[in-house]
Image (cartoon, grey):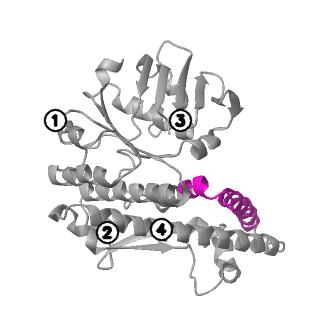
């Protein structure tokens, strides 16, 4: 994990250095002070991307030509440098050697919850798949190979469907079936591990009416096809439909995690605050799987923690901190609640953002 980070010409930060705690890190400050920018920079160390902007060039401070972020993992002695010049691709150096942004996830895994994706249950199936796959990319060395192979073959099958010719489709279906079955098996195992950890975490929380709804949520993994038949059988059966739609309609690329309360989509029942708390709990459960099963410590980045959470639900979040062993980084406008955290955590640090600029 990142213990030290230095920002140069990154958004509103000209030259700032932070020492992060391996436990709980809290950033506070008024709107526009740079709280989200700091969390963006920390997350950038894990992905080479911002969770807020798709245009990474926009992160360069106005009036300057480039930004640089330096990170340090003191436990492993790893150094990281990320530079973005206006007219050049992102440059990433890990231990002074060039590497790719995809390598960052493996070395500095993190998950971000922010106002655009605060609801795991309400997000698209693609978002939930990516969140699951993101952890598997970090934890399972054979998963990336199967994932990339599957999507390359899927692209070829879809090209044949778009051209309206399936004479040579069978070899691609064979490979899709092989890789897809591997993906499905690995996803299902990690999903079940996460579900177990979610139950472990919620059982440790103080019982309050704020989390009663968790007892009623049924969480299921959908593989992307009817498992009564093999993936290859389903693809053969669906060729006519797929030709009409010019795309592959079944398979791991259609997988999802489904949330139900009394057989009703949970999104139709849960409040926005309940959805956000559940998203935090689910991400924490995935991180606990990484820590306990794979000895990997991931960071959870939460922008504007109080948004959508009432006082009771926020109290559950504070209670949650007791049961976690990973780095958590979150922000809020004011500091009225840190007194509830600070006495209980030796690894707690808080940062007044206006004083960091």
Q: Is residue 68 left or right of residue 327?
A: right
Residue at point 84% right, 72% down?
168
**Disc 3 secondary structure class:** helix
Which mark lies nearer to you, 4 or 3? 4
Residue at point 52% right, 61% down?
293
Q: Could you tell me what secondary structure mostly forms the magenta stretch?
A: helix
Question: What residue is pinned by disc 4?
Answer: 193
The magenta stretch spans residue 145: yes
Which is more N-terminal, label 1 or label 2? 2
In the picture, the disc for residue 266 is 2
Which is more N-terminal, label 2 or label 3? 3
Question: What residue is pinned by disc 1?
Answer: 336
Which residue extends farthest right?
A: 168
Q: Is residue 195 left or right of residue 335?
A: right
Residue at point 59% right, 52% down?
138
Estimate the x, y position of residue 11 in percent, counting from the top left.
44, 23
- Between the residue at mark 3 and the residue at mark 2, the CA separation in whole angstroms equals 34 Å
Vertical placement of 154 versus 17: above or below? below
The magenta stretch spans residue 158: yes
Q: Residue 147 or 151: which is nearer the viewer?
A: 147
Within 10 angstroms of label 2, few (less than 14), some, or many (20 or more) residues? Answer: many
Which is more N-terminal, label 4 or label 1? 4
Vertical placement of 286 versus 350: above or below? below
Q: Which residues are magenta?
A: 134-163
Residue at point 15% right, 49% down?
311
Task: Locate the C terminus by quadrant.
Answer: top left
Within 10 angstroms of label 1, few (less than 14), some, or many (20 or more) residues? Answer: few
Question: What residue is pinned by disc 3?
Answer: 45
- Tell me if label 3 and label 2 are in contact, CB under 8 Å: no
């Amino acid at each position: 994990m990142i213990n030290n980070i230095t920002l140069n010409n990154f958004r509103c930060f000209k030259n700032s250095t932070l020492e992060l705690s391996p436990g709980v890190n809290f950033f506070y400050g008024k709107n526009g002070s740079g709280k989200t920018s700091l969390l963006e920079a920390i997350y950038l160390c894990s992905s080479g991307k911002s969770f807020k902007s798709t245009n990474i060039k926009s992160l360069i401070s106005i009036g300057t030509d480039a930004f640089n972020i330096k990170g340090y993992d003191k436990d492993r002695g790893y150094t990281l440098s990320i530079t973005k010049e206006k007219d050049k691709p992102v440059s990433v150096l890990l231990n002074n050697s060039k590497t790719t942004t995809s390598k960052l996830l493996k070395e500095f895994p993190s998950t971000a919850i922010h106002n655009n994706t605060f609801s795991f249950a309400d997000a698209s199936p693609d978002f939930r798949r990516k969140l699951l796959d993101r952890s598997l990319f970090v934890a399972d060395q054979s998963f990336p190979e199967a994932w990339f192979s599957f999507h390359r073959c899927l692209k070829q099958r879809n090209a044949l469907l778009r051209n309206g010719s399936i004479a040579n489709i069978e070899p691609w279906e064979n490979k899709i079936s092989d890789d897809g079955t591997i993906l499905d098996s690995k996803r299902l195992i990690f999903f079940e591990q996460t579900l177990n950890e979610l139950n472990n975490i919620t059982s440790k929380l103080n019982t309050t009416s704020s989390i009663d709804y968790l007892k009623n949520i049924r969480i299921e993994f959908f593989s992307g096809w009817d498992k009564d038949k093999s993936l290859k059988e389903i693809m053969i059966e669906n060729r006519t439909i797929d030709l009409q739609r010019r795309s592959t309609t079944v398979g791991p690329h259609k997988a999802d995690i489904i949330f139900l309360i009394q057989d009703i989509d949970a999104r139709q029942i849960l409040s926005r605050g309940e959805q956000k708390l559940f998203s935090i709990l689910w991400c924490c459960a995935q991180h606990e799987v990484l820590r306990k099963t794979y000895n990997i410590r991931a960071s959870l980045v939460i922008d504007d923690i109080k948004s959508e959470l009432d006082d009771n639900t926020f109290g559950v979040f504070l209670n949650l901190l007791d049961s976690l062993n990973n780095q958590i980084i979150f922000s809020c406008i004011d500091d009225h609640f840190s007194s509830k955290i600070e006495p209980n955590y030796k690894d707690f640090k808080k940062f007044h953002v206006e004083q960091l600029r």
